[in-house]
Image (cartoon, rainbow, N blue to C red):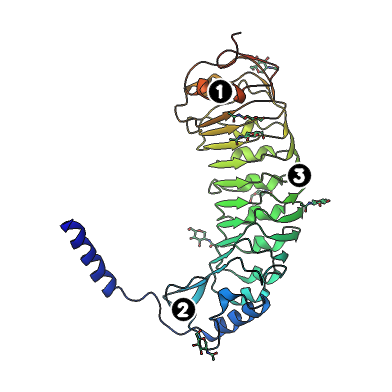
Amino acid sequence: MAKLFLASILLFIFFLYLPSPSHGVCHPSDMKALLKIKAALNNPSQMASWNETFDCCAPFQQLISCDPATNRVNNIYIDSDPRIRGRSIPSAISELTYLTLIFISPTGLVGSIPPSFAKLKYLQELIIWTNHLSGPIPEFLSQMQSLTFLRLTGNQFSGTIPASLSGLSNLTELDLSNNNLTGTIPDSFGNFSSQLNFLELQGNRLSGEVPRSLGNVDFLSIHLSNNEFTGDASFLFGSNKKTTDIYLDNNAFEFNFSNVEISSNLWRLNISHNKIFGSIPHGLATIPSLLLLNVSNNNLCGEIPQGGKLQSFGSSAYLDNKCLCGKPLPAC
Ligand SMILES: *[C@@H]1O[C@H](CO)[C@@H](O)[C@H](O)[C@H]1NC(C)=O
Ligand SMILES: *[C@@H]1O[C@H](CO)[C@@H](O)[C@H](O)[C@H]1NC(C)=O
Ligand SMILES: *[C@@H]1O[C@H](CO)[C@@H](O)[C@H](O)[C@H]1NC(C)=O
Ligand SMILES: *[C@@H]1O[C@H](CO)[C@@H](O)[C@H](O)[C@H]1NC(C)=O
Ligand SMILES: *[C@@H]1O[C@H](CO)[C@@H](O)[C@H](O)[C@H]1NC(C)=O
Ligand SMILES: *[C@@H]1O[C@H](CO)[C@@H](O)[C@H](O)[C@H]1NC(C)=O
Ligand SMILES: *[C@@H]1O[C@H](CO)[C@@H](O)[C@H](O)[C@H]1NC(C)=O
């Protein structure tokens, strides 16, 4: 108790002497942009305090923060507000030249991403999730060379995936899931470095074969569920990969599973609801970390290897195959 008290005092003193995060005046051009953004979004209540005398770099604000070194706005968040619904993304956001993060929560925004965003050369994270954006995924995103996170999940983007996105060499996450995208995964995606940890394309209408070049990228997680992919995907596996999550379920993949190389880093594997044939590789029975397996609804055959976690998943993980047998299914 006394220790806790002492710790609190020390913490208090620490904060007392911490220089306040930023207390400069709002840069005039940032101020101008913020007022334009407020007007374009129909004066939402969350921006009520934004006026000509407002200090946009005051500490502990909800929607914006500044870089303390330069007093320029570097992060902007837009939250749900009934006044914003049906508006489009204000192009004036791109006048906040020093932005590193744009985070737009579900707010009912429509339209597309303003082309002026291409100028945001310091932008690292662009997150616009569960809005009603539509039209094609813009090509100009590939000009935003600082991007590390691009997350556009849950909109209504349609058309094909721009091949040029693979030119974003610092990307660690690309999430275009749950849109209305068609066509194939561009060949160029094999040119992503293994710095691209997360590839999330589930819940679109993507089709055709996954390019073989994708086998060159060592993803942490690849999510292709709920599309119309066909053909081989065995090259996404590999004993030396760091990949923990592979979701291929609910497509029309068709390949021999028998000799797929299973990495000991694997945590979650869902290949349910495809046309995958052959048998369950023995490697799967040697992974102590496996948390999820579902191979149901395929054309698999033969005995389920005994060992590891394979008997812990329950029969629903194995049902509706051609001739799988052995625990947890009936004996062969
Ligand atoms: C700006 O907003 C602050 C606080 O919300 C208020 O006190 C001030 O009067 C406003 N200034 C102008 C010029 O409207
Ligand atoms: C990419 O990341 C590296 C390492 O973090 C950094 O030095 C480089 O400036 C980044 N490139 C761009 C265009 O931001
Ligand atoms: C997806 O696109 C099709 C036409 O290509 C259209 O009929 C459908 O309404 C779209 N779905 C959504 C959710 O936007
Ligand atoms: C991948 O990158 C290499 C070298 O930069 C380039 O020659 C090749 O055309 C690229 N492949 C695709 C499909 O874009
Ligand atoms: C695995 O895939 C099937 C088929 O798409 C789906 O019903 C199931 O919810 C998935 N399981 C998990 C845990 O993702
Ligand atoms: C799958 O591959 C295994 C091992 O190479 C082979 O023995 C088997 O015949 C193949 N299965 C089918 C259905 O082609
Ligand atoms: C496996 O996927 C099927 C759908 O294909 C689903 O019904 C079942 O509950 C899933 N089982 C497990 C253990 O994930």
Looking at the image, which residue is at 53% across and 42% down?
Answer: 220
Outermost top residue: 332
Count of numbered circles in the view? 3
Q: Where is residue 227 in the image (x, y as percent from the top left)?
A: 72, 40
Is residue 293 positioned above or below 20 on the image?
above
Q: Which amino acid does label 3 sit on?
A: Arg
Task: Tell me the crowding category of disc 3: few under 14, some 14 to 19, or many 20 or more residues within 10 angstroms, Cα based.
Answer: many
Mark number for residue 314? 1
Within the image, what quadrant is residue 43 found in? bottom right
Residue 265 in view: yes
Q: Does the residue labelled 3 lie within 8 Å of ligand 3?
A: yes
Label 2 secondary element = loop
Position of residue 244 in the picture relative to residue 270 (left or right): left
Pointer 3 residue = 205
Pointer 2 residue = 57
Task: Tell me the crowding category of disc 2: few under 14, some 14 to 19, or many 20 or more residues within 10 angstroms, Cα based.
Answer: many
Residue 219 in view: no
Q: Nearer the viewer, residue 176 or 140?
A: 176
Real-space Cα separation, disc 3 to disc 1, in angstroms = 30 Å
Task: Tell me the crowding category of disc 1: few under 14, some 14 to 19, or many 20 or more residues within 10 angstroms, Cα based.
Answer: some
Q: Does the residue labelled 1 lie within 8 Å of ligand 7?
A: yes
Is residue 199 positioned above or below 130 on the image?
above
